[in-house]
Image (spheres, rainbow, N blue to C red):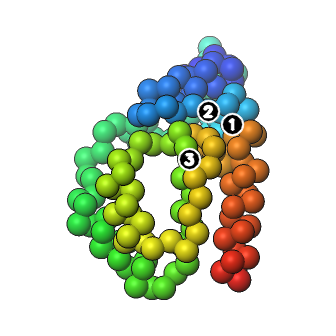
C-alpha cells in the first residue's frame, strides 16, 4: 500500500532500475502506467492510500517457463501462417545476445525490423513513442494493412 500516487510512481521507477540491462522509464510514462494500475482505499485509517490492483503473485518468479523448443514452435506457427511480422527493438531494452537475436529473426523472418531509441516501455515514453508510432505506420503501409 502506498500513501499517495507519487510514492507508487517512485516504486514503479525503482522496479525498472532492477530490470536487466540499461532499463529506464520516464516519470511521465511511469505516471501513466501507475495511474491505470492502482485503486484507492476509501475506508478506515488508510483512506486515500492506494495499492496496485494486480495480483502481487505476478511479481514472483514464474513457476513455468517456455522451453526454447516451445518458443521456436510458436514462432514457426506464426511464420507458417504467413503473417507479416513487425519487429521493433528498443536500443536499451531487455538484453538479448546476438545469437538469440539472429535465431528470432531467422524463425520469424520479419518483413519489417527497426531498432529504435528507448527502453522496454519505449512505446509509452513521451520522448520515444513517436518513433514507435511512425515505424508501425510504415510497417502497416508496407504490408497494406
Specify whether 125 is left or right of 14: right
- For the residues labelled 2 and 3, the Cα–Cα distance comes to 12 Å
Q: Compute the Cα span from label 3 to label 1.
A: 15 Å
Q: Position of residue 78 (x, y in %)?
A: 43, 77
Name which quarter of the figure residue 49 lies in: top right
Asked where in the image residue 1 lies, by quadrant, the reply is: top right
What element does badge 2 sit on?
loop
Q: Residues within 10 Å of mark 3 (few under 14, many from 20)?
A: many
Coordinates of residue 91 in the picture (x, y in percent): 55, 43
Query: Can you see residue 140?
Result: yes
Q: Give the quadrant of residue 60.
A: top left
Which residue corresponds to mark 3? 90
Q: Which class describes the residues within 10 Å of circle 1: few (<14), some (14-19), or many (20+)? A: some
The residue carrying mark 2 is: 25
Q: Nearer the viewer, residue 63 or 25?
A: 25
- CB contact under 8 Å: marks 1 and 2: yes
Q: Nearer the viewer, residue 8 or 112?
A: 112
Residue density around tag 2, few if under 14, some if 14–19, many if 20 or more, within 10 Å: many
Residue that sits furthest to the top in the current view: 45
Amino acid at each position: 500500500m502506498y500513501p499517495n500516487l507519487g510514492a507508487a510512481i517512485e516504486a514503479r521507477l525503482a522496479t525498472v532500475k532492477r530490470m536487466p540491462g540499461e532499463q529506464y522509464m520516464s516519470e511521465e510514462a511511469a505516471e501513466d502506467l501507475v495511474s491505470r494500475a492502482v485503486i484507492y482505499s476509501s475506508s478506515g485509517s488508510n483512506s486515500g492510500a492506494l495499492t496496485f490492483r494486480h495480483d502481487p503473485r505476478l511479481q514472483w518468479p514464474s513457476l513455468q517457463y517456455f522451453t526454447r523448443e516451445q518458443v521456436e514452435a510458436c514462432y514457426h506457427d506464426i511464420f507458417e501462417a504467413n503473417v507479416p511480422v513487425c519487429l521493433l527493438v528498443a536500443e536499451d531494452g531487455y538484453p538479448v545476445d546476438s545469437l538469440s537475436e539472429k535465431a528470432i529473426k531467422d524463425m520469424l523472418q520479419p518483413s519489417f525490423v527497426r531498432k529504435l531509441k528507448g527502453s522496454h516501455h519505449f512505446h509509452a515514453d513521451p520522448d520515444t513513442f513517436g518513433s514507435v508510432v511512425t515505424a508501425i505506420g510504415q510497417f502497416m503501409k508496407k504490408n497494406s494493412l
